[in-house]
Image (tube, rainbow, N blue to C red):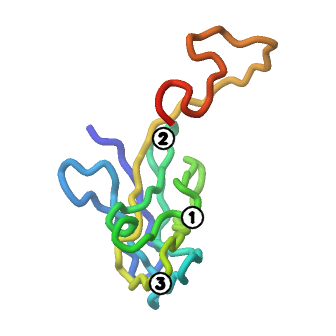
Amino acid sequence: MADKLKIKILRDGASVPAYATEGSAGLDLACASAEPVTVPAHGIAKIPTGIAAECERRDAALLIFARSGLATKHGISLANGVGVVDPDYRGELIVSVLNNSAEDYTIPPGERIAQLVVVPFVRAEVAVVDELSDTERGAGGFGSTGKV
């Protein structure tokens, strides 16, 4: 049985997120702006989706990822890398996009702009300690386990 994702439509022209294929991990999010939104070259724009969402699971967050086609063909990625929607947020899902290209890019209403993935999470109990356990890697950082 699938977990239920409740969607509330907040704007005219909003699209209900949908999986593109049977094997899709993410639901497509679309631009719900009344007018096209131009993202300036090397600039950022906030794109409204016109929806709010609630997952019935209290231990799941909604993660917003870039669409690979927009990223590779037009240089459009997310300004914050990955958007995290906490389970208690009930406002409109807004996608902050970054135009990494040297040309303006216009997003028309209805264009798919991002992917929404439901991800279970674990809330940790934070404990301040004097020591951490030893591992083979230890404090080795970037590139310490192979080529940089």
Residue 2 screen position, x and y as percent = 29, 41
Q: Who is closer to the viewer here, 123 or 144?
A: 144
Task: Say what amino acid the circle numbered 1 marks.
Answer: Ala
Mark with earlier residue (1, 2): 2
Mark with earlier residue (2, 3): 2
Q: Quadrant of residue 30?
A: bottom left
Q: Is residue 22 left or right of residue 37?
A: left
Q: Are marks 1 and 2 in contact (CB under 8 Å)?
A: no
In this rendering, which labeled residue sits more in front, label 1 or label 2?
1
**Residue designated by label 2:** 60
Q: Which mark is residue 121?
A: none
Check the image and name the residue furthest to the bottom.
35
Mark with earlier residue (1, 3): 1
Task: Say what amino acid the circle numbered 2 marks.
Answer: Ala
Q: Which mark is residue 103?
A: 3
Q: Is residue 125 left or right of residue 120?
A: right
Q: Who is closer to the viewer here, 31 or 130?
A: 130
**How many residues crowd mark 2 within 10 Å: few (<14), some (14–19), many (20+)?**
some
